[in-house]
Image: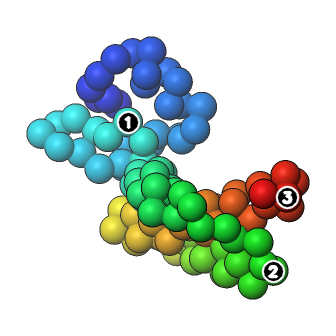
Amino acid sequence: MIFKGNMKINSFLSYFCHRRPERSFSYKGYYFPVCARCTGIYLSMMVFFILVWNISFNSMLSAIMGIILLIPMGIDGTTQFLNLRTSNNKLRLITGLIGGIGLIILAKYSNNLIFHV
């Protein structure tokens, strides 16, 4: 594995992603520090969180929508884990992008439930 960059950051990121090279994007022989699915998750979480900073997700419909957005990522990851099919990095990225949005919706919904904000 050739992960270019700070070793402390690479070590830290290994707690959040398996970082398998065949499931990671590469550029000029160096692999991204996280896999394609995690790249999609983290990208969409950052962008969507900024876009919906002041929006409150406090209805049950929001929670259902968040769960529905997680389903494609769950199906892709589970079927690949069970060796029922082989996924590819493009599909992993797309399902990660969709799943990241679902995670932010569920996090904001949970925050509203816990803190009644």
Q: Which residue is mark 2?
A: 60
Mark 2 or 3: the one toward you: 3
Question: Eyeballing the image, is 39 above or below 12?
Answer: below
Q: Residue at x 36, y 48 (%)?
A: 24
Name the secondary structure under disc 1. loop
Name the secondary structure under disc 2. helix
Q: Which residue is mark 1?
A: 33
Q: Whole-percent x and y of residue 92?
A: 44, 65
Q: Amino acid at mark 3?
A: His
Q: Whole-percent x and y of residue 49?
A: 51, 57
Q: Does the image show residue 12?
A: yes
Nearer-the-camera pick, 104 or 115: 115
Q: Which residue is mark 3?
A: 116
Number of residues whose C-alpha sits closer than 10 Å to that of mark 2, classed few (under 14), some (14–19) or many (20 or more):
few
Q: Amino acid at mark 2?
A: Met
Whether residue 33 sits left or right of residue 55 in the image: it is: left
Q: Who comes first in sequence, dot 1 or dot 3?
A: 1
Question: Eyeballing the image, is 12 above or below 45?
Answer: above
Q: Single out the residue that lies furthest toward the bottom.
A: 61
